[in-house]
Image (spheres, grey):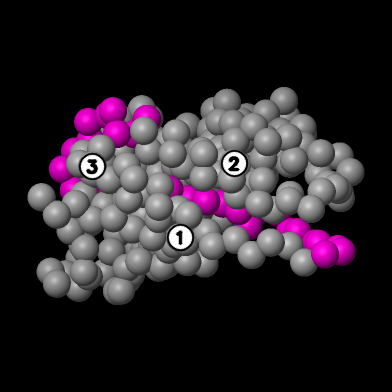
Amino acid sequence: MGGTSVTLNVPLSGNWEEDKAIIIKAAGQPTPADEYFTHATVIKGLFDCRTYNTPAQPNHPQRKGLLRKVHDELYPIAHFAKLYFTCPKNVVVQWIDGNQQHDAIVEYRKEGSNQSDIRYLEVTTLQGKEDADELEKLSKDSIYTTVGSNTAQEKHDRKVAQLRNILNKKAAIVYPDKTALLVYTDEDRFQHFHFGMPEPVINKKAEYEEVLRELELSLQNFSHVFIFSNSEIYCAWTNSK
């Protein structure tokens, strides 16, 4: 079975517990950066197809198991690759399953084809229990309504607090040289509609950057740190040592 960026050389059985290992292995295939979004989408499609009508099918859009890795690692890698690499066809990314101290390996096909010396990616997202609860409510009711004038600001403040906590935790871990930390804000997973008074203007870039600068002295175990959405890199820090 083949796709644009995923090849399975072993037949799938239809038993999820058997097929899961095959699909995880396929998810770890080295993939050009410009094809990585398609790669992540195919892996999610295989997950949806093979877990349908089985005990492994999520009751609502849960983030656990392979599906969590797709949303929290593969898709963020794809968005980062699109936003950062100047010649993505010359960059190959390989996702690594497991608890090692990086989530992906980056290789370059041509010297000088990109501006980066990044060799490893460590990926995390600003998702929390509140986001999971919203997903569960949306899966049941289709529309989830919140009332309050400061809802958008409150959600952003929560993400800023999550960012500070994540950076503090990651700062205590030793990573391989040339490891970049990718912090995916993931604020666009929900479609929002606002009625009434205008929502407050939130300077996400400035507030995320403030946290990054506040903690930069503790981030010396990384070569780079990026805070980004699916459409822009809000801010970045590069280790000058």
Q: Which residue is mark 3?
A: 217
Q: What kind of residue is marked 3?
A: Leu
On the image, numbered disc 2 is attached to which residue?
Answer: 158
Nearer-N-terminus badge (3/1): 1
Sequence-first disc among 2 and 3:
2
Q: Residue at x 67, y 40 (%)?
A: 131
In this figure, what is the number of numbered marks?
Answer: 3
The residue shown at (47%, 61%) is: 205
Q: Residue drawn at (68%, 36%), measured in percent from left and top?
A: 130
Instruction: Report the front residue among 155 and 150.
Output: 150
- The relative height of residue 105 versus residue 63 in the rendered view (above or below) is below
> What number is the disc on residue 92?
none
Where's residue 153, x and y in %?
66, 51
Marks 3 and 2: in contact by CB < 8 Å?
no
Cα separation, mark 3 vs mark 1, equals 18 Å
Q: Quadrant of residue 117?
A: bottom left
Residue at left offset 52%, top offset 51%: 185
Res. 27 visible in picture: no
Residue 206, numbered circle: 1
Residue in the foreground of this view, choosing between 50 and 136: 136
The span shown in magenta is 169-197
Judge by depth and name the residue closer to the eye, 236 or 53: 236
Say what amino acid the circle numbered 2 marks: Arg
Q: Position of residue 132 (x, y in %)?
A: 68, 36
Amino acid under disc 1: Ala
On the picture, is 171 further left or further right than 241?
right
Label 3: state its secondary structure.
Answer: helix
* Alpha carbons under labels 2 and 1: distance apart: 15 Å
**Residue 187 % position (x, y):** 60, 53
Q: Position of residue 113 (x, y in %)?
A: 20, 73
Task: Say which element carries label 1.
Answer: helix
